[in-house]
Amino acid sequence: MNDEVTMNEITLDNGENYLVLDKISSAKATYVYLAKEENDDILLRKRNVVDGTAVLDQLDDLQEIRFAFSLFFRKHPELLEESLS
């Protein structure tokens, strides 16, 4: 059995590399969940298209951040259970 997982890596405007954990679309937006490979740094971004180019914007609204994480944990309930243990 092969347990190897291939993940996409992207470089943000600040020059830092992040792995794409997941992308989840809703009626509101597409949210992108990112993590650094070498530490516990996790980022949440909202994907927008500006002049035909995909841009990952920060979320400033706490309600939207909660909504985006609720989507993530609805899709990955095992991770929520794991984080609460």
Image: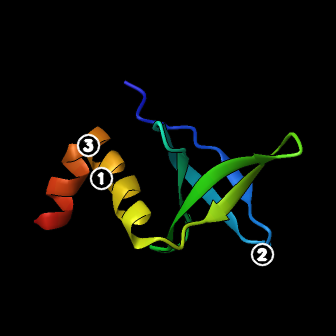
Residue ID for mark 3:
74
Answer left or right for 59 relative to 75.
right
Residue 9 spot, x, y in % from top left: 68, 51
Q: Secondary structure at mark 2?
A: loop
Asked whether the residues under the numbered discs 3 and 1 touch, taking CB atoms below 8 Å apart as contact, a structural biologist would say yes
Answer left or right for 63 relative to 61.
left
Q: Which residue is depicted at the point 34% across and 46% down?
A: 71
Image quarter of the N terminus: top left
Asked whether the residues under the numbered discs 1 and 2 touch, taking CB atoms below 8 Å apart as contact, a structural biologist would say no
Give the mark nearest the N terminus, 1 or 2: 2
Residue ID for mark 1:
70
Q: Amino acid at mark 1?
A: Ser
Q: Which residue is depicted at the point 31% across and 39% down?
A: 75
Q: Residues within 10 Å of mark 1 (few under 14, many from 20)?
A: some
Query: How many marks are shown on the rendered structure?
Result: 3
Residue 44 spot, x, y in % from top left: 51, 62
Asked if 36 appears above or below 21 in the picture, the reply is: below
Image quarter of the C terminus: bottom left
Q: Amino acid at mark 2?
A: Asn
Q: Residues within 10 Å of mark 3 (few under 14, many from 20)?
A: few
Asked whether the residues under the numbered discs 3 and 2 touch, taking CB atoms below 8 Å apart as contact, a structural biologist would say no
Residue 14 disc label: 2
